[in-house]
Image (cartoon, rainbow, N blue to C red):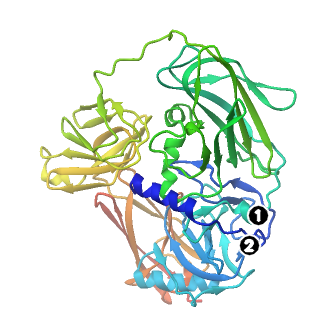
Amino acid sequence: MNLLRILLVISVFKLQAQKTIDSNYFSNPLDIPMLLSGSFGELRSNHFHSGLDIKTRQKEGIPIYAPADGYVSRIKVAHYGYGKALYIKHPNGYSTVYAHLQKFETSIQDLVKQKQYKKESYEIELFPKQNSLPVKKGDLIAYTGNSGSSGGPHLHYEIRDSYSRPMNPMLFGLDIPDTKDPVVTAVFAYPIGDDASVNKSFDPVQLRLIKQKDGTYKTEKISAYGKIGFGVATTDQQNGAYNRNGVYQIQTSFNGMPKIDICFEKFSFDETRYLNRYIDYTYFKEHTTKIQKLFRQTNNPLSIIKQESDNGFVTIADGFSSNFTIDIKDYKGNLTQIIIPVLGKKEALLAKKQTLDTLQYIPSEISSSVQRGLFTIDFPKNALYQGHYLDIKTVGDTLHLHKDVIPVHKNISIAMDIGNYNIEDKNKLYIARQAYKDNYYYTTTRREKNILTAKTRVLGTYTLAMDTIAPSVKAVNFTDGKWISNNKTLKIKIQDIHSGISRYRATLNNTFILMEYNHKKDVLTYDFNDNMVSDTQNNLRLIVTDNVGNSTTFEAIFFRKKL
């Protein structure tokens, strides 16, 4: 989605009359104490968290109840992402979303299973008609789980408005006990422009935090000149949980005059990847800490910025003393305040900026293409948030595409000529990304004649890799030729150490059977409640294929009495 469209969407946000939120409309979806492992708007990998992660005591199978009348409008089952997810449309125009589920309520589960068998696919997406799956407030709709890309058992719960924009569920009266002030771990000052400086430096400067007797923080006094921005690393912790979650609001002022107001109440999925523009991406990649930049740079259309003066920047004049204040709040209003004393002082810089003659300049406002050795790298318009000098070089079949310290918003295309390889090998080649040390991971690759092409939104090292080894397949809870009448499930472990698993298909007595893939444990599971077995002897056949087409066929016979 281009920047113009996002700006138009945000303009619509501002023009539309805001609905009055009824804080009593939705009840709690779980009948357990509300404790959070993740808050709304929390800074995640490449996105803002779009809901609440409600803790379930490390257990799966806790009943979920409809928080209001409505109907099931969407059901999605996927190996990754939300895993098993349910969407309910409500009469007030809002929708609620429940993700990482263990299973659905029986009637919904039966419908999903029927459609999965008809499609012969575990992954499926359904859009039931309005009258087909109605629910009443308090009806059982599903059970909590750990499916998809979940890091542990919990319920991911969302409330979306009539335009499918996720909203903070706390606005609707969901009560989470919280008497703790937000925590601050780092504060930075950012000189902007060639003539700006902080403490004689043109680079960002971390400020030393000093806690005051009244609980506020004060930093050491800084000397600064020119256009300056500030950033903060902050989290919030609710009562009864150790998780470090996101805060609700950050407001800044300069000598008492408001500068910026950032509030995590609502955003659009179209803008969520701009998180990488909002944070100090370079610092995060080098130090694993997310600094929230309290100023708006170009190519940052985020609607979480509610008000701003001069895009949140301050201009420091020589010889003037001033104070910059940061107020950080959680949803319950607990406040942490930081005061930054500033002395305006124009000073000679301690170091000069490095020359960039050996680097390749990549603009953001137009598309560009770079040729290096066997590789061609295409950057579309606005692939980067701003123009950058990149270190791009090749050594044989390896491309060094700078380092992953600059955020990429749109897919970059990497093309490689493999004309010098044997025809037998070409179908087994792919482009892999070096994640860390010497570990390389498959990047989705297509081949057209002698050209391999991969798309990526991550800078770093890419190399040509070959996979000639088929996936491994191993029975987990049964043995070939044995009776397993007492088994509730059939489990098979599948792994591929190179390009990774692409697809699988299982049959029992030449009839398709549904197997759920848990990619975190590399296990396929068939539920005998599907009743696809024959009395006594059963012939199982499983074909597993990796991302370059290598496949393994696993066959086994087991004996089982029909229940």
Residue flagged by tag 1: what amino acid is it?
Answer: Leu
Marks 2 and 1: in contact by CB < 8 Å?
yes
For mark 2, give the secondary structure. loop
**Quarter occupied by residue 352:** top left
Residue 95 at x, y percent in the picture:
61, 73
Q: Position of residue 302 (x, y in %)?
A: 53, 50
Quadrant location of the C terminus in the rendered image: bottom right
Marks 1 and 2 sit apart, C-alpha to C-alpha, by 8 Å
| For residue 179, above or below residue 486 | above
Q: Position of residue 422 (x, y in %)?
A: 13, 49
Q: Residue at x 28, y 21 (%)?
A: 357
Residue beneath disc 2: 26
- Disc 1 target residue: 174
**Residue 356 position within the rendered picture, expressed as x and y whole percent measured from the top left:** 33, 22
Mark 1 residue element:
loop
Q: Quadrant of the N terminus?
A: bottom left
Looking at the image, is 256 positioned above or below residue 348?
Answer: below
Q: Residue at x 87, y 30 (%)?
A: 214
Q: Nearer the viewer, residue 553 or 389?
A: 389
Question: Taking the image as drawn, is residue 203 in sight?
Answer: yes
Give the camera-side residue of 398 and 503: 398
User: How many dots with numbers?
Assistant: 2
The three-letter code of the residue at mark 2 reads Phe
Q: Is residue 524 left or right of residue 187?
A: left
Q: Would you say residue 55 is visible in this rendering?
A: no
Image side of residue 11 versus residue 2, left or right: right
Q: Image quadrant of residue 549?
A: bottom left
